[in-house]
Image (tube, helix red, strand yellow):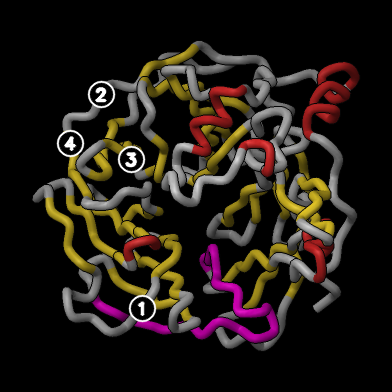
Amino acid sequence: MSSLRGPRAHGDLAALALILAACGQAPAKSPPFEVLSLPADTIVAPWTNIPGAAWLGGGRWVLVAGDFDAAVIADFGTKTLTPLGGAKQQAYLHPASVFSVGDTAYIADWGKRRTTVWLGDGRLIDSIPAPDALRGSAPKGRDGAGQLYFEVRPPPGRGGSGNRDSAAIVRAPRDFARYDSVARLAPVDGREMQRGETTRFERQVLSGDDLWGVWRDGTVWIARILHNQIESVAPGGRAAKGPRLPDPVFEVTQADRLRYLQQFPSDIRPKETDLPWALIHPPFVAAFGAPDETIWLEKSKPVLDTVRSIQVLDRRGDLLRILRMPGEARLLGVGADAALFGEQFEKGVRLMLVRIPAPASTPQ
């Protein structure tokens, strides 16, 4: 496998956004907005943080709440949450993330340094060790041939200098007989900060990342944060880029900073002036591959906005639809005919299954 070091860190996203807006490729034409209906199917989960989720088919989803060491199956048919593997399971210790392929779920567990594989009926069928060659990274995707895909971050290094380098998407067969670098991701948007007598390179708060997934044929799609577009990398390595997406640039405001700080308990809350803040919001905050091989991008919004937009793209990155969801709910995943949202409230997390409406019109 080639070296995982990549290009140096990019500059401020604000400056790049202005450059791209001034002289870059013309953004894609926007289709009309479609408002999602409020959900009829809800389940309340007893967590204080939004979980990760993956669709298992029908009204069944697997959820991982890492802060609570919880992995459960949410069944909207029976309105139940069932611990994956049973209440006394010993297969995982500290589940951290999840993805699914069909009705099979992959649960990354940093406590036991492995990924456990489960059928939708709750049966454990495999356990994948974290490969030392990839510094213990857990897989984030799998193609139809059974190959696994990893995101390998550079080691932070002394003073955080390693964060200036790019991460790599790495492909490996199930037996880890070889490792192939598929693509590079943008380095974190960072800034040097003085911490006592030392200087550290730290990630800017409220900045974003390249996000990605893999289709069954082994094509990797990457939502590129700097150019706000989809890049596809075919199994043979050929890359293709879709059009830039039509989005406004939102400045990070005082209200955004205050909302972020309010997430911390008062006794450990950092001072606003002690943090390196991004100048603008990233164009998207989450990305999901749907069963019909569309890509769903959850777009950024200022904290005072009451509606969140979701762009639905085809495999090439062409914009098909713009859906709008009122309220503060976050998109957790996409199924065949419904999307799962999660919203924090005083009793925990409200899980909401929202039906995907039929397209209002076909873009020209």
Q: Amino acid at mark 2?
A: Leu
Give whichever of discs 4 and 3 has the lower sequence position: 4
Percent x, y for residue 29?
Answer: 66, 15
Give whichever of discs 1 and 3 has the lower sequence position: 1
Q: Which residue corresponds to mark 4?
A: 41
Element class at badge 4: strand
Q: Residues within 10 Å of mark 4 (few under 14, many from 20)?
A: some
Is there any visible trace of residue 230 in the rendered image? Answer: no
Residue located at (60% from left, 74% from top): 137
Q: Are marks 4 and 2 in contact (CB under 8 Å)?
A: no
Q: Amino acid at mark 1?
A: Leu
Q: Which residue corresponds to mark 1?
A: 93
Is there any visible trace of residue 14 in the rendered image? Answer: yes
Q: Which residue corresponds to mark 2?
A: 38
Residue 281 on the magenta segment: no
Instruction: Tell me: 129 left or right of 202.
Output: left
Q: Are marks 2 and 3 in contact (CB under 8 Å)?
A: no
Q: Residues within 10 Å of mark 3 (few under 14, many from 20)?
A: many
Note whether 70 is above or below 293 in the view shown. Answer: below
Q: Are marks 2 and 1 in contact (CB under 8 Å)?
A: no
Q: Are marks 4 and 3 in contact (CB under 8 Å)?
A: no
Q: Which residues are magenta?
A: 123-144
Q: CA distance from mark 4 to mark 2?
A: 9 Å
Q: CA distance from mark 4 to mark 3?
A: 12 Å
Q: Amino acid at mark 3?
A: Gly
Q: Quadrant of the C terminus?
A: top right
Percent x, y for residue 86?
Answer: 17, 75
Give whichever of discs 2 and 1 has the lower sequence position: 2
Q: CA distance from mark 2 to mark 3?
A: 12 Å
